[in-house]
Image (cartoon, grey):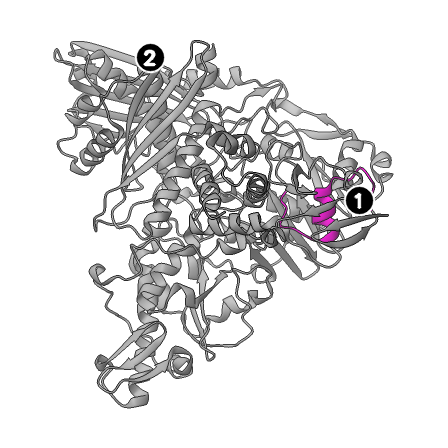
Amino acid sequence: MASHTVSRRDFVVVLTATGSGLLLGCRVGDRAGATTAAAATPPAFAPNAFIRIGSDGRVTLIMNQVEMGQGTYTSMPMLLAEELEVGLDQVQLEHAPPNDKLYANPFFGDQETGGSSSVRGFYEPLRRAGATARTMLVAAAAQTWDVDPASCRAKRGVVTHTPTGRTLPYGALAEKAAKLPVPDKVPLKDPKDFTLIGTAAKRLDTPDKVNGKAQYGIDVRLPGMKIATVAASPVLGGKVAGLDEAKAMAIPGVRQIVNLGDVVAVVADHMWAAKQGLAALAIRWDDGPNGSVSTADVLQGLDAASQQPGVVARTQGQVADALGGAAQKIDAVYQVPFLAHATMEPMNCTVHVQKDRCEVWTGSQTLTRAQGTAARVTGLPLEQVVVHNHLLGGGFGRRLEYDWVTQAVRIGQRVEGPVKVVWTREEDIQHEFYRPYYYDRMAAGLDARGTPVAWSHRVVGPAILARYLPPAFKNGIDSDGVDAAVQLLYDIPAIQVEFVRHEEPVLNTTFWRGVGPTHNAFVIESFMDELAAAAKADPVEYRRALLSKAPRARAVLDLAAKAAGWGQPLPAGRGRGVALLYSWWGSYLAEVAEVEVSKAGDLRVHRVVCAVDCGTVVNPDTVKAQIEGGVNFGISGALWGEITLKDGRVEQSNFHNYRVLRMNETPTIEVHLVRNLEAPGGLGEPGTSITGPALANAVFAATGKRIRKLPLVPALKA
Amino acid sequence: MITLSINGKDHTVDVPPDMPILWALRDVVGLTGTKFGCGMALCGACTVHLDGQPIRSCVTPVAAAAGKKITTIEAIGETPAGKKVQQAWLALEVVQCGYCQSGQIMSASALLAKNAHPSDADIDGAMSGNICRCGTYPRIRAAIKHAGKGA
């Protein structure tokens, strides 16, 4: 997701101006789950929305960014604890409630976890929050002893008066600190003095994730709660034409059928009865205007749109002239398909709608949007809508949407008592907000020596930001859709990037683990490989020669190539492919993939080497984990990922026909980190984005086949 | 009425005999550590042990558990193999979102209980039915070997 920057000053003002309205977090103490605090003790000291210290010494950190596997429930506390001077083992975590004023992501202006932005966005604000609290606790101790605060130091939650050795723990200082004014400015540590940031600290969310105690949205259990499962129209815009309610109600355990016209829910004592009830309904659908649409129709629309010029997102030099005067011109069309996120935890939401109150239990990447939709559906003011956040069983952008929350609240309005709405896997795969189908037209001109003199990139796809974050959709350009394309680092004299907006009415689309760069990196790096081949040049050397003005990019390219043994001979049928990535995320990556393609077209990924320069590293082990996971997510997408339409319906339904990577197919993955003190870059998505092109280029090296349309495996078998 | 032995304790539940064990555990008994992923034995998130054998509880009816012992993620740490697996998972920081990890740990525990030093092929054989969308497979493999070393 691309930028919509809220000024840092505004954000800090919010952080420091919260005064006594800080007890918001306390209301959630009733939540189950061991990563949330029991919060039985009233907070004595809460200088900002992220920290609460009780008179019993208990330190609670309130997590504004949600945990979906990316390690934010460890990296955010590391930022706070480093400056607060407490150990990670001394803190309890609590999910933050929805509140855009207190917890807005500075890039987006609302409370959002996405776009690989948590560490980048909160690196300074959270350290400042920790430093502010520590400064006040030290001041309270100094006051108690009547000494100069400069003669005191804090460590592991204890303030020591250095000259006398007297000590006071934070708990004993909390009430006094709470009465002190919140300082405007506090100094932050010099990075060389960090003791926690930069270390491979143990994750705080994992102990409960290995013993079954971790609570995801789907694990919510409430007294009197019913369980529902749903069938929404298989075609977007379709309506229920008929159903056999009596048959469903005859199933033991089925309590109620809720028919909302576009979706039907079976409410039951347990999921088994609900599922059987749904099957017994034998719903007949009126498909509406989209009932005959197929993938070929979508493609036709994209191709037609691609014939017209788009809005220029980047331009330098005279591309048309340079193309016209080139010794060699290369044109290509690249395509990437619709993709499902297929989070392991299917969409689910528990609601309890009452006359003057609505409670929502779910795992969301955008809590305030979840709250907002519940308020809109019920007509209740926001204050009467309580959203309890949970751990997310995968996000990948799917849980940036809130369609399933809207749906659950609509159902909940018609059910007495709390109801948990759980989607089956089939419902989940077929009613996604998908990664869009993108269609890119590329053109390049090479001079007589094969060096590129012109680069033209036309991106055709929807403007997700126009719907999702309108302020970020500027001048007709979806900055996410062209992300990585406009930051092209290669030193080419004439460059033009255009965006053609083409909305897709037959499927909902959204962010998908780096949507813009994930598609653009595939296009750019595959096409760059084509140019290298046309120039009869080595793909690494060819890129390297164009990176003289981008030393960090060149360094990761060199590192990946060296670590992967680039140029060393491989057995027949094997090939290595390279790719480079730089985008709004601010991280530099280079990757070398090694694949084997059999005569029958079977593709096996043997090894992936990734070099990463993401600037300042908060937790190197998490960075490695995110790259490993991102690479594997990228392999699934590049090898097999494809959602197709027939008769307006998604053809895939479960993991047998929406194939994802398994243990026996997983390559060796090596991650090499460049350590420096540059500004932190995003890490959740880049590993996925860079993997598709590295694989496609490796397939080319192994077979001589240039695949311009993902996924790879069907293309190889064709 | 059917009596299920779950984690060493008997639970008498009023459910139809064809109800998959998964829903009896989650929605009737209230043990939510076992996860729903696909409902078709395709992803392994629902893996539990039936008399020590790993099974997909989303397709195994409660009738099949009569007279047998069900072990779930909530109690696997009380078995020697399960404890080693959990410790290895923490030592090597396997987990990301964690949703599939109950099933991964149940499959890995069953493997290690009968084969203390599994080869890569053994690991592929035992673990390829468990999907992890976060892609933690390299660490799962390493953690199984790590747990084996402690055997």
* Label 1: few (<14), some (14–19) or many (≥20) C-alpha neighbours in 10 Å: few
Q: Nearer the viewer, residue A312 or A480?
A: A480
Q: Marks 2 and 1, how far apart in space? A: 55 Å
Instruction: Tell me which residue sits at (72%, 49%) in the image.
Output: B27
Circle number at residue B67: 1
A11 sits left or right of A491 in the view: right
Instruction: Tell me which residue sits at (60%, 60%) in the image.
Output: A32
Vertical relation: B137 (above or below) A436: below
Measured as percent of width and height from the top left, residue B51 is found at: 70, 43
| Stretch in magenta | B15-35
Mark 1 lies on a secondary structure that is loop
Circle number at residue B30: none
Both on one chain, marks 2 and 1? no
Q: Nearer the viewer, residue A46 or A372?
A: A46
> Which amino acid does the dot numbered 2 rest on?
Ala
A349 sits left or right of A196 in the view: right
Instruction: Tell me which residue sits at (17%, 23%) in the image.
Output: A541
Asked whether residue B22 is drawn in magenta, I would say yes
Asked where in the image residue B61 lies, by quadrant, the reply is top right
Mark 2 lies on a secondary structure that is loop
> Which amino acid does the dot numbered 1 rest on?
Gly
Residue at label 2?
Answer: A572
Measured as percent of width and height from the top left, residue A391 is found at: 53, 52
